[in-house]
Amino acid sequence: MPFAFAPHNLIVLAVLGLSAFLYLIMQQPKHAFKLGWAFGFGWFGFGGWWLADTFQTYGHLPYIVGLFVVVLFGLIMGSFLAFWAWFAVKLRQKDYELFWIFPLVGVLEEWLRSFLFTGLPWAALGNLLLETPASSWISIFGNYGATLILLLAVSSLVFLVTTKHRKLATLGLTICLLALIFSPRIEVPNKPTHQAALIQPNTAQDQKWDAAFAQNIMFGLAKLSAQAGDVDIIVWPEAAVPMYLSHAPNWNAWLTKQINTWHAPVIFGGIKLIDNHNRTPKKSQSVLFLAQQGETARPFVGKHHLVPFGEYVPAWMPWLSKLVPDIGDFEQATDNGILTVGEQKFGSLICYESIFSDEAAARVEQGANVIIVATNDAWYGKSPATWQHTQAAQVRAIETGRYVLRAANTGISAIISPDGKIQKSMPWWQDGIVLGRYQPLTHITLYQQWGNIPVLILVFLGLGFGLVQRYRGKR
């Protein structure tokens, strides 16, 4: 399953893996829960191997503790797949009912995973359709609609090959084929009107907060920005400025002077101290600042969806901060997530937020006509996680019908068009500039209008029908 996602994009492996998963629970329904957990552990436990390196390198924990975190991650994520297999088997009255119950419960599982335990919709199955013509359905039914199409295809293949219900399987495959042939067209401007410069400084994570490297970091950002030329917006990554500017007046004055020479607004990532209503201790916010020529006041927007165990300690685990003191003490933002430059309204998604459909939809609801994703993927090292994170940004572009300007510290920095295609990018782990065109758009996609409601109604109606059938069968 991990190899089905970016950067490998071997969707056939997902089809094979999910088909084997369905076949096994059909053959051994009594062991569905264990089979689901094993499948989920293999997918997310082995797929999340990079977490061990991250915890060792940046969390300053022994590698064995990092491995324990990977195992724990696999077990927690595997529990969702265990629920998928168990509930699908419990709900079916006859074996052929798994044909539609398996896909519907699969969508339910992904929806639950998006908000339970603060939510982690990482490696969503709908992301796999990005490389297919069916990806445009995401603009209507969102990521869960794409997941449903994929799982219907899987279910149809299994029933065609392993059962006598070939008419049912043929119907499912026909629906999937029609979805490919008659996928809706997403309009993309032929000549986008604006020019963007995305700055990729390639700052190593172990240097970012080291005062000895602050000058090199700031000078490097300024040098790249000065080379951008005549553009409409310059975007720096998340936490590009490695200090509290409010506590560094000399650096603040120097940065203002530099920005005044570039003749372009700059959106840059930083951290900001907030007094938390005069309570102590003070807390931090991960924010994006907007700096424009001749202005000293800088509007800012903060991060709305924080990373548990990385940017805050959940209230039900206060003891963890004593074990891992490097965990951040960040405050959740309550602003609307919009930075305005003339008629351009930039909706901000800071790092982790870009994997959540509702965060992007909320920015568009507030009037965003361009989406900014500012991130620091140096945490992931040279693992597939960076590419999978970029996939999520591509899906957000299709769902919202907006250009996405993704500025990443070590990459992948990219300009993504409303059809999810990467228009311009540069190699990761290099410093440089991504220069490309974009356009503020006001079109509202059907997904933006209705959200996940149509797909969830279909899921709950289908599963409700299954529950009624099971109850009647028992009677």
Image (tube, rainbow, N blue to C red):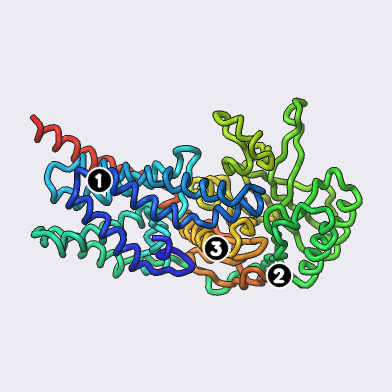
Q: Are marks 2 and 3 in contact (CB under 8 Å)?
A: no
- Of residues 406 and 265, the one drawn nearer to the viewer in this rendering: 406
Q: Quadrant of the N terminus?
A: bottom left
Read off the residue under disc 3. Answer: 383
- Residue 431 circle label: 2
Q: Residues within 10 Å of mark 2 (few under 14, many from 20)?
A: some
- Residue 321 spot, x, y in % from top left: 64, 35
Callout 1 amino acid: Ala
Q: Which mark is residue 32?
A: 1
Above/below status of 171 relative to 458: below
Q: Which x, y percent locates residue 67?
A: 52, 50
Inspect the image, locate mark 3, and give the three-letter code of the amino acid beneath it.
Ser
Residue at left offset 38%, top offset 63%: 129
Residue drawn at (19%, 46%), measured in percent from left and top?
29
Label 3 CA crowd tier, 10 Å (few <14, some 14–19, many 20+): some
Q: Residue furthest right?
A: 250
Q: Residue at horizontal 74%, vertical 52%?
A: 290
Residue closer to the observer: 430 or 398:
430
Q: Position of residue 455 (x, y in %)?
A: 33, 47
- Dividing the picture into quarters, in which one does residue 152 lie? bottom left
Between residues 61 and 130, which one lies in front from this camera angle?
61
- Quarter of the image with the C terminus is top left
Nearest to the eye among marks 2 and 3: give it: 3
Q: Secondary structure at mark 2?
A: loop
Kind of residue at badge 2 = Asp
SS at mark 1 in the image: helix
Which of pointers 2 and 3 lies earlier in the amino acid sequence? 3
Real-space Cα separation, disc 1 to disc 3, in angstroms: 31 Å
